[in-house]
């Protein structure tokens, strides 16, 4: 509500504080949103590595948007070394939950990814 000014005055500092509090307590939506705040510079300077950190925490708990966004960070090498294999891993997890962008991005990699395949046995993520 504070981030978007819905029902309260817009206050990115308060939003950042509340998302950080939720994220540090292990709440996946707070972790995902904290990643977004850092990625887009909402009330903070843009950061390349912080979004990866917070998206990963959310993704590992099954948060579909965290999974898709982490896949995107790997896909394009944003804040982390580019890895189509890791991108496929996270897009797949989002896709099987019915996430449209995960499905779309996974299809894109399969079509243009030069033979990248899903290897669920690799535990490097």
Image (tube, helix red, strand yellow):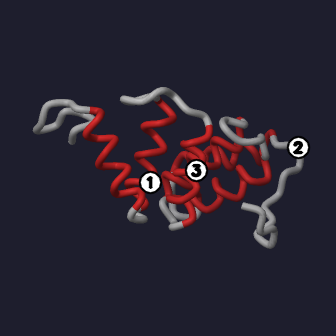
74 shown above or below 96? above
Mark 2–mark 1 distance (CA, rounded to whole Å): 33 Å
Residue to which mark 2 is pinned: 114
Spatial separation of the CA atoms under disc 2 and disc 3: 28 Å
Residue 31 — which label?
Answer: 1
Is 119 left, or right, of 75 in this rendering? right
Q: What is the x, y in percent for residue 16?
A: 34, 41
- Where disc 2 sits, the SS reads loop
Label of residue 53 in the image: 3
Q: In this view, does 45 lie above or below 20?
A: above
**Label 1: few (<14), some (14–19) or many (≥20) C-alpha neighbours in 10 Å:** many
**For the residue carrying disc 3, how many other residues have a C-alpha within 10 Å: few (<14), some (14-19), or many (20+)?**
some
Question: Does label 3 or label 1 sit earlier along the sequence?
Answer: 1
Q: Which of marks 2 and 1 is in front?
A: 1
Q: Are marks 2 and 3 in contact (CB under 8 Å)?
A: no
- Closer to the eye: label 2 or 3: 3
Residue extending farthest bottom = 121
Most extreme residue toward the left, as rendered? 7
Q: Which residue is drawn at 81% across and 68% down?
A: 122
Is residue 109 shown above or below 26? above
Q: If you read the primary sequence from the N terminus, does the residue marked by circle 2 or circle 1 appear first?
A: 1
Secondary element at image label 1: helix
Residue at 78% x, 47% y is: 84
Q: Do the residues labelled 2 and 1 touch (CB within 8 Å)?
A: no
Secondary structure of residue under mark 3: helix
């Amino acid at each position: 509500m504070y981030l978007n000014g819905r029902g309260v005055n817009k206050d990115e500092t308060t939003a950042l504080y509340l998302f950080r509090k939720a994220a540090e307590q292990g709440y996946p939506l707070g972790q995902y949103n904290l990643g977004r705040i850092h990625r887009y510079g909402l009330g903070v300077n843009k950061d390349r590595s912080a979004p990866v950190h917070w998206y990963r925490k959310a993704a590992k708990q099954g948060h579909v948007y965290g999974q898709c966004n982490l896949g995107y960070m790997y896909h394009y090498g944003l804040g982390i070394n580019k890895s189509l294999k890791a991108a496929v891993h996270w897009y797949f997890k989002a896709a099987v939950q019915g996430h449209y962008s995960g499905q779309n991005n996974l299809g894109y990699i399969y079509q243009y990814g030069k033979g990248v395949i899903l290897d669920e046995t690799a535990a490097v993520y």
